[in-house]
Image: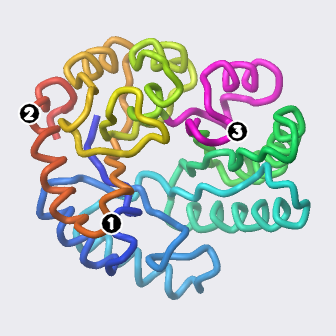
Amino acid sequence: MKLGFLTNAYRNYPLSYALETLSDYGYKGIELWAKGAHISPFDTKDRWAEIRKQIENYNLDVFAVSAHLDFVAPSAQKRCEQIDRFIRVLDLAAYFGVGQVHTASGGLYEKISPELQEQYFIEAMQKIGAEAKARGIRIGLEPEPEKWLSTPAQLIELFANNFSQDTFGVVVDLAHADGIGENLSDYIRKLAPYLTHIHLDDVHAAAFPHRHLLPGEGCVDYIEIFNLLNEINYKGWLSMELNRHINGPAQAARLACQHIERYKYLWSNGD
């Protein structure tokens, strides 16, 4: 396992500042946030080339692209726009040689039934799944406590009836199990067959809506979790997600890294 960082925490700062500080603190790579000012799927390839050069200059890997969009909105026009945008994100990921793009479902909407939102989501994933497969990219689905797709049970059903693991996987955020009242270790075990990525953070027990805390500020037992990840033979990236720390991302990134480094003997592969 290697330690990386999701750049959405730096949304109010230049990407160059994120790259400089993350490299200084010892992060090995980034999960590139494709929804803000850092980079857009609508940028020119010249702009993409400029950003790729910046990242290479700091010797960082781009191991995933994050683009959480809304695929279950009541508006058909909005859903189509989101699908089209995600396909452009797939092109961006392919340009950077990235094999994973992460998303949540969108929602939750009170005006339409969960069953209809499920239908919308499956229809959207069928369209973007075909595009992802053509590009050799896997879509990481992230359950969110306050979204339509929120539970392991939903994901397991989707994989059983609709989704191929060749094209889809699961992103587990350590703060999300508590948000739906599940034990984190049990949550990870349920999703282990589909697991492609881990988001690191912390959470206060029984907090709703959930809030991403710095590692060490909440109830996550990192020794237990890293031992479990070793037990299930997880070999992927550990991506720090501190999306609530946008006013001081560098300090948050430094403190988070210092805390996770305490357990490096459990997660490092020697890099």
* Residue at (27, 27) in percent of width and height: 219
Whether tag 2 and tag 1 are in contact, CB under 8 A, the answer is no
Q: Where is residue 34 drawn, in percent x and y?
A: 53, 67
Q: Where is residue 244 drawn, in percent x and y?
A: 36, 57
Q: Where is residue 116 drawn, in percent x and y?
A: 89, 38
Name the amino acid, label 3.
Answer: Trp
Name the amino acid, label 1.
Answer: Ile
> Disc 2 or 1, which lies upstream in sequence?
1
> What residue does disc 1 label?
246
The verdict on residue 56 being magenta is: no
Name the amino acid, label 2.
Answer: Arg
Check the image and report above or below for 265 versus 62. Answer: above
Whether tag 3 and tag 2 are in contact, CB under 8 A, the answer is no
Dot 3 lies on which element? Answer: loop
Within-10-Å neighbours for mark 3: few <14, some 14–19, many 20+: many
> What residue does disc 2 label?
262
State which region is magenta.
143-171
Q: Quadrant of residue 152 in the image?
A: top right
* Residue at (69, 61) in percent of width and height: 86
Q: Quadrant of the N terminus?
A: top left
Image position of 129 (left or right of 66): right
Q: Nearer the viewer, residue 263 or 168?
A: 263
Check the image and report above or below for 175 versus 244. Answer: above
Dot 2 lies on which element? Answer: loop
> Disc 3 or 2, which lies upstream in sequence?
3
How far apart marks 3 and 2 lie (CA) works out to 35 Å
Q: Which mark is residue 148?
A: 3
Dot 1 lies on which element? Answer: loop
Check the image and report above or below for 5 versus 261. Answer: below
* Residue at (19, 20) in percent of width and height: 223
> Disc 3 or 1, which lies upstream in sequence?
3
Label 3 vs label 2, nearer the camera: 3
